[in-house]
Amino acid sequence: MSDRFYVGTRKGLFTVERNSNGWEIAKVDFLGEPATMFLQDPRDGWLYTTLTLGHFGAKLHRSGDGGKTWEECGVPTIPEGAEVPMMVFDDTGMPMSPAPQKAASLSEIWSLEAGGVDEPEVLWAGTIPAALYRSTDRGSTWELDESLFNVEARMKWFGGGKDDAGLHTICVDPRDSRHVTIAISAGGVWETHDAGESWTNIGEGLRQDYVPPDLAYAKDTQDAHRLAFSAADPNVMWVQHHNGVFHSTNGGQNFREIKDVPPAVFGFAVCAHPHDPRTAWFVPGVKDECRVPVDGKLVVTRTSDGGETFDVLRDGLPQEHCYDLVFRHGLDVDSTGERLVMGSSTGGLWVSENAGDSWTCVSNTLPQIYCVRFER
Amino acid sequence: MPRVTFTPNLRKHLDCPPSEVTGGTVREALDAVFTENSKLRGYILDDQSRVRKHVMIFVDNEVISDRNQLSDAVSPESEIYVMQALSGG
């Protein structure tokens, strides 16, 4: 059970610990800077924080002593002369094909994950614009996954909430480190079985309602807001999609849409139970064009039966005039599946110690929260 | 020799004292600074070697016109200021 978690915010990285008084903020690093992504490597305890500096670009800092000291290390770079597509529509409302292009440049490191237990010091990073990078030296240097960067479909990808498409989810299969599944907003779900040498666009059954009907099931532009797999059974995957909730039992090859999710199927975050593949949590909002909790009441939804039914969990969460939104990386579950942490776009931070049945507010005055992660 | 001065706001990230360098263009002058301070490069230029969107560069009190190639001329007496834009915060 984890007694510590980290919160990446618009104004710094907060360390929160459980003591005799409950959960309290123990430390703030990088005060004033946008700490947009965080990783605690469970293999060696090293900490990594990405800073997305408004003026001076994306930076990566690491700590080998539990956050006592930090050093700046390398960042991914987009290849010289690379271009990304621009989303431009023709007179009929269809995206122009081929899409006009513009010069690419790294704007953000949007996801950061440790490699497998058999490949110490290996890290994966996903970026905006959408690209995948691998480091074999704890982030000192980064190598672009050229195979993914060169897939033809990349010129169809477009931004979801950001100007350019972004790679926000990296799932390293605990059974086989060379098997990696990623998700892109908006560029679909992809997997490799050879550590990134080749990629396959998976995700049959994902449906998008923000394109003309003929493109609804096109796999290469799906906006899976977040993808999560159960460590107990990595074949079980959950997607909180732009317009729905989806469930897979074959490693993301096929998804079924779950339409009856109270109070709404819209949201960004999803977490899967580490020991029970039937259990997952979501944080719903009204819908795409009204990104607030339904009726101003913040809730978490939980399924414990593989998506057949959902509990709406609200004990301890604000139930009146609440407009907190929980983004993709704003929800995490610890290694036991009992403790959850949730951070919002307006600085609300809540913890549950009973799998979401009830919640305790740690703070509602933090800066905008980008990511929360338990120590593992 | 042209003199390059950096916004004090950079000093919380890394050390970057004013430098006197050789060079006939902004690119040449900055490259001379980056030779001595390689980490500074990524704070001023993006990964395509263009001036970052929210960074402003002045040469003798004039904003440079070429943010991609940095070809604006500098003289031995030039004062180059690298500032952060008011946008981007």
Image (cartoon, coloured by chain):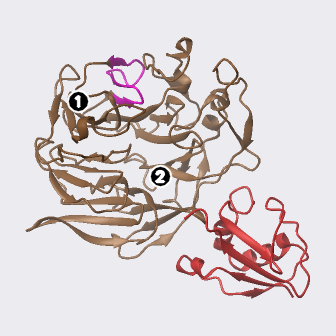
Which residue is at a point 21% across and 40% down the rendered structure image? A297
The image quadrant that residue A305 belongs to is: top left
Q: Position of residue B73 (x, y in %)?
A: 91, 73
Q: Position of residue A269 (x, y in %)?
A: 34, 39
- What's the amino acid at mark 2? Val
Most extreme residue toward the front, as rendered?
Answer: A321
Bounds of the magenta segment: A238-257
**Image point (57%, 81%), residue name:** B11
Q: Is residue A43 left or right of residue A333?
A: right
Residue at image mark 1 = A277
Query: Please, which residue is most extreme toward the left here?
Result: A20
Q: In the image, residue A270 lies at what x, y percent? A: 31, 37
Q: Which chain is brown?
A: A
Of residues A238 and B2, the one nearer the viewer is B2
Q: Is residue A372 magenta?
A: no
On the rendered structure, is A23 left or right of B31? left
